[in-house]
Amino acid sequence: MIRVVLTGSESTGKSTTAARLAEHYAAELVPEFVRDYAAARGGLIEFSDHGPIAHGQMALEDEHIARGNRIVIQDTDLLSTVVYCEHYFGACPRWIRDAAAGRRPDLYLLMDIDLPWIADGVRDRGHMREAMQQLFHDAVFATGVPVSIIRGQGDERFERAVDAIDELMLVEG
């Protein structure tokens, strides 16, 4: 099974692209746990929320991976939890960092910030897009997992993501 994770700063088309990719490949789509979690709390997350967020994300991943066949598309993973926890609170619990390292995907699609930022009640870092994107860039490249940076608008963005996945699938055989 091949696991592909879309990641990057806020408002980079992760959810839209992930849904299209899952449909294209007839793949399981692992949704982002934290979005609903944060929305239920009015967008306010405390340090103590990161344990439930990590457990919720892992449960979603495990559920969808168990149903998956040759490919699973994830709308995020624990690495995002690590990045945001460290950004907001200056630290992340070791067990979350270790779990993220132990659950590395086969490919990261790092979604670029070349799309307009759209506020939605949960997103709050529009004024820090470049800095946040750099945090994601550094985090994904530090994993040692293959990374493809996805740029472009609309269909172009989707096609670049497909090209990156198809290339991985050729390598994986």
Image: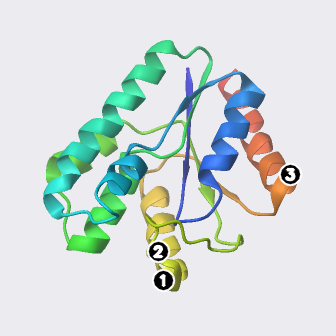
For the residue pair 105 and 78, the one nearer the viewer reads as 78
**Comparing labels 2 and 3, the label whose residue is closer to the camera:** 3
Q: Looking at the image, which residue is at 80% across and 42% down?
A: 163
Give the labeled residue for mark 2.
Answer: 132
| Quadrant occupied by the C terminus | top right
Query: The residue under label 2 is which amino acid type?
Result: Met
Residue situated in front as seen by the camera: 63 or 137: 63
> The residue under label 3 is which amino acid type?
Asp
Query: At numbered mark 2, what does the secondary structure look like: helix, strand or loop?
Result: helix
At a point 48% along the width and 83% down the height, the residue shown is 128
Q: Which image quarter: residue 139?
A: bottom left
Residue at numbered disc 3: 155
Asked if marks 1 and 2 touch (Cβ < 8 Å), the reply is: yes
Q: Which residue is the extreme one toward the bottom?
A: 127
Residue linked to disc 1: 128
| Pick the front one: 118 or 14 | 118
Under circle 1, the secondary element is helix
Q: Label 1, label 2: how many angstroms apart (C-alpha)?
A: 6 Å
Q: Is residue 134 above or below residue 172?
A: below
Which mark sits nearer the N-terminus, 2 or 3? 2
Q: Position of residue 92 (x, y in %)?
A: 20, 60
Q: Residue at x 53, y 78 (%)?
A: 129
Residue at 66% in and 38% down: 19
